[in-house]
Amino acid sequence: MSQLHTIILDTDPGIDDAMALLLALASPEIALIGVTTVFGNSHVAATTRNALNLLHFAGRADIPVAMGADQPLVLPRGRTGEHVHGPDAMGNIGWDAVHNPNQRPLAIHAAQFIAETIMQRPGQVTIVAVGPLTNLALALQLEPRIAEHVRAVVVMGGAFLVPGNVSPLAESNIYRDPHAAAKVFAAGWPLTVAGLDVTTAVRMDNAYFAALKESRSRFAEFICRIVPFYQAFHREVRGYRDGAINPHDVCAIAYVLEPALFAGEQWRVMVLTDGPARGATIPDRADRHWSTPKVHCLTRVDSARLLAAFHERISRAI
Ligand code: BDR
Ligand code: CA
C-alpha cells in the first residue's frame, strides 16, 4: 500500500460519494488532484456545490473542482436522487443554503479537465468514477488517446450476477446514462468495475457508525451526520435492519487502495441502452459471443477487511 495513486474522482455527491471522497482524503497513498462533478444524485449545480463544500470542510479547498454534465448523452435526464440522498443530496443537513463566493469550480468542463490532465501526465492518472459516466464518455470523445494514457479507470456501477437497484436488471449509475456507459465499457482502457455484486455485500450498520463516532474524528462525525437519510432509504426500500446501508462508492476507492480485498473476472460486457432492460450490464461469461474489450468485473469482496480499513482511516482523520 505504499504506492502513490494519482486520482481524479468523478462524482455526484451524494452521501456514499462523500464517504468515498473522505476515504480518499484520509488515505496517504492517494493524491487527489481533481474532483469532477456530474448530475445523478442531484442536478450538477448541487453536486458541484456539495463537492466544493466537502473539500472546504476537509480543509482541502486547494483541490480543483470541474463541473461536468447535467444531462445524459442521449436520453432525457430522469428523476435525480434526492429521494435517496436528501433534498440537498447530502443527508438534508441544510447545504442548500450554503454559498461561499470564494469557492468556485474551474472555468473548464469536467471532460476537458479529465482529458487534459491525463494527457499532461501520461501513464500516471487513475480515474475513479462513482456517478453516471457522461463526463468520461465526453472526455473519450474529446481526446480518444486518453484510453492509452490513463493509468487505470475504476467505476462504481452495474450489476453482473445480481439484481439491479433501479430496475430488475439495472444499477443506477449505468441506468442514468447507458449510452455513456456503453462507450466507457467499450473504450479498451484498463477498466475495473465495482458493481452491486460487491457493493451490496458491504454493509455499515448502527453499531458500525457508533464505533466510528467514538473515534471523535471530524470525518467520522460528519459521516454520522449525513448518513441517517441514507439509512432511512435503505430501511424503507431495501428492508435493511439495524440502520444498515451499502456504501457503494466507497468500494471503488477501497479497490484502488487494496485490490486484494476483491476478486473478479475478465468479461466482455454489453450495456443495454433502451427498453425494459435499459442499463443492464450483461457479461459474456462463456466468452463466445461478443468482441468488445474485456473488462475487470469485481464479483467478490472481503467485506470485513474493507469495513476495518474504512474505520481505521476515517477514525484517524482528526
Ligand atoms: C450508485 O447510485 C448512487 O445513488 C450512489 O451514489 C452510487 O454511486 C449506487 O447504485
Ligand atoms: Ca455516486
Image (cartoon, helix red, strand yellow):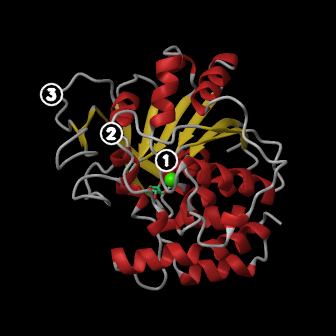
Residue 79 visible in the shown view: yes
Which label's residue is closer to the chain start, 2 or 1?
A: 2
Where does label 1 land, which residue?
131
Relative depth, front residue between 269 and 175: 175
Q: Position of residue 225 (x, y in %)?
A: 66, 76
Relative depth, front residue between 300 and 55: 55
* Mark closer to the observer (1, 3): 1
Mark-to-mark CA distance, 2 and 1 = 16 Å
Where does label 3 land, which residue?
288
Q: Which mark is residue 313?
A: none
Give the amino acid type for the residue marked by disc 2 in the picture: Leu
Q: Which quarter of the picture shows residue 283?
A: top left
Element under label 2?
loop
Which label's residue is closer to the chain start, 2 or 3?
A: 2
Q: Position of residue 311 (x, y in %)?
A: 65, 68
Q: Residues within 10 Å of mark 2 (few under 14, many from 20)?
A: few
- Residue 4 position (above or below residue 214): above
Give the amino acid type for the residue marked by disc 3 in the picture: Arg
Mark-to-mark CA distance, 2 and 3 = 31 Å
Q: Tell how many labels.
A: 3
**Where's the C terminus, which quadrant?**
bottom right
Q: Position of residue 211 (x, y in %)?
A: 66, 80
Q: Are marks 2 and 1 in contact (CB under 8 Å)?
A: no
Relative depth, front residue between 207 and 102: 102
Q: Position of 115 compared to 274: left or right? A: right
Relative depth, front residue between 236 and 292: 236
Where does label 2 land, which residue?
75
Q: Are marks 2 and 3 in contact (CB under 8 Å)?
A: no
User: Residue at image x 65%, y 76%?
Assistant: 224
Residue 246 visible in the shown view: no
